[in-house]
Amino acid sequence: MPANVVYVQHARLTHKVTSQDHKGFEAFYTSEMPKVSTFLMNLGASPYEAADATHEAFEKLLPDKWHSLEYPKAYLRTVAHRNYLRQVGSRVLPTDPVPDRPGGTCPVELVILTDERQQMLGLLATLPPAEREAMAWNLDGFTHEETAKALGKKPAAVRKAYVRARARLINALELKKEVQTNE
């Protein structure tokens, strides 16, 4: 067997995974890990919860599966969001730092929380769930149609939730500006 080929055994099939698959998956991981973590934070997760849920989602993709999906980015976000929602019963703030992944970089460190970003997360937290979800997908670069497909909703419903969310955020920002001006 060549050195650059690994065979991954599943319950019903054996799939040949080349080192090229691993390199592609590694590049996909490096690119998407901070994006998915940020996406989950837009939905209400703490950085630690987001990193944990995203890691679990990546485990489901593994190098032998991710490239066979039609929409791996949407799949990853959907699975990560479900993982985050399942954490509800076990949410505890960690007392130890998140362990580094191989290579020495912690994914939480890749998500930079500036004052402006924290302010935005605070504003997103005020939105109703459907509006927050529509806004999070939009902020992550997905169209209303792509979001609707990933969520199993109609594009019109996603568009409407996004428009409402945007209006609420604009109003909140204007109100905040007014308060700062009056101080």
Image (cartoon, helix red, strand yellow):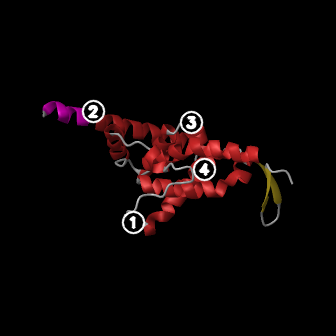
Q: Secondary structure at mark 3?
A: loop
In this rendering, the label closer to the viewer, 3 or 1: 1
**Dot 3: few (<14), some (14–19), or many (≥20) neighbours within 10 Å?**
some
Overall secondary structure of the magenta stretch? helix
User: Residue drawn at (74%, 53%), measured in percent from left and top?
Assistant: 64
SS for callout 4: helix
- Mark 2 is surrounded, within 10 Å at the Cα level, by few (under 14), some (14 to 19) or many (20 or more) other residues, namely few
Q: Residue at x 60, y 46 (%)?
A: 29
Q: Quadrant of the N terminus?
A: bottom right
Q: Quadrant of the C terminus?
A: top left
Task: Name the residue tied to disc 2.
Answer: 174
Estimate the x, y position of residue 71 in percent, counting from the top left.
67, 44
Q: Which residues are magenta?
A: 174-182
**Marks 4/3: CA–CA distance:** 16 Å
In the image, what residue occupies the spot 42% across and 65% down? 91
In x, y percent, where is residue 77? Answer: 56, 49
Q: Which mark is residue 143?
A: 3
> Tag 3 or tag 4, which sits nearer the N-term?
4
Residue type beneath disc 2: Glu
